[in-house]
Amino acid sequence: MTYKAVLADLDGTINRGKSLIPGADIVYGELSASGIKWLFLSNNAATLASDLAEKITSLGLPVDETQVINSASALIREVRRNLVGTRIMVIGQPRLRLALEEVGAITTEDPFSSDIVVVALDTEFTYEKMKRAHRAIQNGAVFWATNMDPTYPDADGFSPGAGSVVASISTASGKQPERIFGKPSTDMATIAIERLGIRESECLVVGDRMDTDVRFAKGAGMASALVLTGATCLEDLSKYSFAPDYILESISNLKTLF
Ligand SMILES: [Mg+2]
């Protein structure tokens, strides 16, 4: 099978915290030289796609900001297209709130006038914020989440992710998010397909998590390769009722599939 594009995850696939997975830079040089297109798809909405591009570039793999899509990108696109003037309560980092304002959202902390509550990773999350979000949902605001990752890898191991913040608000309100933008939801696949101008069947998704990356590929009608440099080891595969199309020790072995 010849793929025309590689859509790879970041954390656990391309980098682990502040180190690039060995050989990733070489593989991407080879992909570019062979005319294969590539994008990175990250659930991380603690920062914007442009910041993620800068980070990966600083690790030694030069990436343009148009080559990174994160769950914040999908949310921002939805607001720009369909929700200009909507009042949104953002539980998330200030960068995300500003980006939503830039595309036309009216951000608010008032639970009585919020149309939507969007929950993302918020490193300044407090009981007060939980209470505000809960109140807004009780008052009829729609509940959305950027992504549901319970944890994310950092320098010390794993820290609580957006999914942990979402869970507290779900517990209080008794409601699950009506919409989630991160993998396994396929919003980012739609953006990737538009941006690259190719078909789903021509894309190979590469990632380290079964329930986000591989499930995302299946939902989007794309082939998938699981790498063993992140959250999943071979023994974990039997826990799932679905399987990736390929298993690679590392992204550095990617060229064996082309
Ligand atoms: Mg990952």
Image: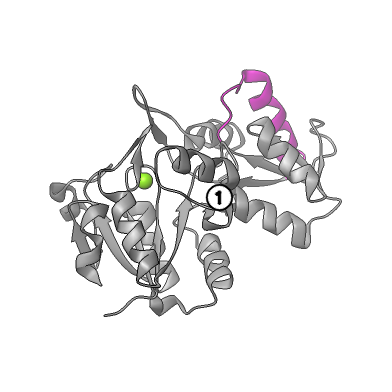
Percent position (x, y) of residue 150? Answer: 42, 37
- Give the left or right position of residue 17, taking residue 161 as reference: left
In the rendered structure, does residue 124 fall within the stretch colored magenta? yes
Nearest the camera: 125 or 7? 7
Towards the viewer: 15 or 234: 15
Q: Is residue 143 magenta?
A: no
Across and down, in percent, residue 42 comes to 47, 49
Residue 215 image position (x, y, % from top left): 36, 60
Q: Position of residue 213 (x, y in %)?
A: 37, 56
Say if 34 sits above or below 116 in the image: below
- Residue at x-position 39% and y-position 42%: 60
Instruction: Report which quarter residue 245 is drawn in.
Output: bottom left
The secondary element bearing badge 1 is classed as: helix
Q: Is residue 20 above or below residue 156?
A: below
In this picture, residue 242 sits left or right of residue 107: left
Residue that numbered label 1 is attached to: 71
Q: How is the image coloured?
A: one colour
Whether residue 234 sits left or right of residue 103 in the image: it is: left
Q: Quadrant of the C terminus?
A: bottom left
| Residue in the image at 77% along x and 39% along y | 139
Image quarter of the N terminus: bottom left
Magenta residues, start to end = 121-141
Q: Is residue 202 visible?
A: yes
Between 193 and 187, the one nearer to me in the picture: 193
Tell me the amino acid under the disc marked 1. Ser
Crowdedness near tag 1: few (<14), some (14–19) or many (≥20) residues, C-alpha within 10 Å? many
The answer to whether 70 appears left or right of 16 in the picture is right
Q: What residue is rendered at 67% in x and 39% in y?
A: 96
Closer-to-camera residue (217/20): 20
How many badges with numbers are in the image? 1
